[in-house]
Image (cartoon, rainbow, N blue to C red):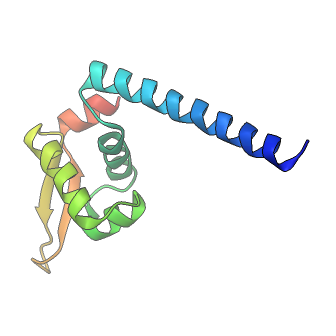
């Protein structure tokens, strides 16, 4: 197999993966009204309850502003609550609500 054939094979495989992600994303949006990034955020909050927003951004590999807008939408849907740290009011933590737990179940 020459280099061009190898590169073409990789590109075809990547295209299949991208298509599978797109199909899964549409199904997720239709069934649960969630985007893939929202689902990733919910899962990470579930794994580590009361997670600080900065740490959560790093965990899901998103910028803080992007994470903040995703969490805003999840808060509006009452799937996530923002909790201020009791000792340091600058720290904001994300916590799943009962509705958030249910949607993940």
Residue 34 location in percent, x, y? 27, 32
Q: How many marks?
A: 0
Residue 89 location in percent, x, y? 9, 77
| Above or below, 50 relative to 10 | below
The residue shown at (74%, 37%) is 9
Q: Nearer the viewer, residue 92 or 50?
A: 92
| Above or below, 84 relative to 14 | below
- Which quarter of the picture shows residue 66? bottom left
Residue 93 location in percent, x, y? 21, 63
* Quadrant of image for the N terminus: top right
| Above or below, 67 relative to 86 | above
Q: Residue furthest right?
A: 1
Residue 51 location in percent, x, y? 29, 62
- Which quarter of the picture shows residue 29? top left
The residue shown at (13%, 57%) is 82
The residue shown at (37%, 45%) is 40
* Quadrant of image for the C terminus: top left
Q: Nearer the viewer, residue 86 or 55?
A: 55
Left or right of 14 on screen, residue 19: left
| Above or below, 94 relative to 101 | below
The residue shown at (30%, 65%) is 63
Left or right of 13 on screen, residue 87: left
């Amino acid at each position: 197999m020459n280099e061009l054939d190898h590169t073409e094979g990789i590109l075809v495989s990547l295209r299949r993966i991208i298509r599978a992600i797109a199909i899964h994303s549409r199904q997720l949006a239709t069934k649960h009204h969630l985007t893939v990034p929202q689902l990733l955020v919910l899962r990470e909050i579930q794994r580590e309850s009361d997670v600080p927003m900065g740490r959560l951004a790093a965990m899901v590999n998103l910028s803080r502003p992007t994470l903040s807008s995703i969490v805003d939408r999840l808060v509006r849907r009452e799937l996530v609550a923002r909790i201020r740290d009791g000792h340091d009011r600058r720290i904001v933590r994300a916590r799943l609500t009962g509705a958030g737990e249910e949607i993940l179940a």
